[in-house]
Amino acid sequence: MRLGDLDALKEKVNAFYDELFVGCVSSDLITFAKSVDEMIDNVPTVEAYPFEQVQELVKLNQQFAQEIEDLKRPQGEWIIDGHHIRCNKCNEYICNTDGEGDKIPNNFCPNCGADMRGDKE
């Protein structure tokens, strides 16, 4: 598929007709010219959008994709087990950086990806 400016094509075709048919006007030529104009008007087109509008659509698409990903992500919570912290979804222990067992290290389980931003945030 090739994209082009159909309005510019129409102008060139009409200029060509003007040169070709100088002093020669017949109903067959007029019918032919009108049918070519009609064919150009009926060519399938692709709409062009300003770059800023495309950027905004990309941004919205990325936000939407993240929202979908968040919906698919399991909700979990950190279980403090003595001086250890584990995920209630995969039961994997994670490193506790403060050694006290009460510091929640991040918002997502590094093992299963469960979202831990619930009540523990």
Image (tube, helix red, strand yellow):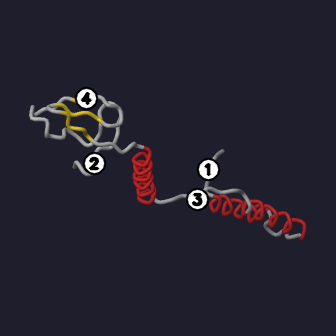
Name the amino acid, label 4. Answer: Tyr
Choose the circle earlier in sequence order: 3 or 1. 1
Give whichever of 50, 107 is nearer the camera: 107
Choose the circle earlier in sequence order: 4 or 1. 1
> Residue under circle 3?
47
Q: Quadrant of residue 56?
A: bottom left
Query: Which label number is shown at residue 82?
Result: none
Q: Nearer the viewer, mark 1 or mark 2?
A: 2
- The Cα–Cα distance between marks 4 and 2, rounded to whole angstroms, is 17 Å
- The Cα–Cα distance between marks 3 and 1, rounded to whole angstroms, is 10 Å
Q: Nearer the viewer, mark 4 or mark 2?
A: 4
Q: Secondary structure at mark 4?
A: strand
Which residue is at 64% across, 46% downward?
A: 2
In-image side of 115 versus 71 (left or right): left
Q: Can you give x and y, in whole percent of width and height, for residue 28 in the image?
A: 90, 66
Query: Which label number is shown at residue 3?
Result: 1
Give whichever of 36, 56 is nearer the camera: 56
> Residue under circle 4?
93
Q: Quadrant of residue 1?
A: top right
Q: Secondary structure at mark 3?
A: loop
Give whichever of 116, 20 is nearer the camera: 116
Choose the circle earlier in sequence order: 4 or 2. 4
Name the amino acid, label 2. Answer: Arg
- The Cα–Cα distance between marks 4 and 1, rounded to whole angstroms, is 57 Å
> Residue under circle 2?
117
Q: Can you give x and y, in whole percent of width and height, for residue 62 in the image?
A: 41, 50
Q: Nearer the viewer, mark 4 or mark 1?
A: 4
Count how many numbered circles sit on residues in the image. Answer: 4
Which residue is at 74% across, 66% downward?
A: 18
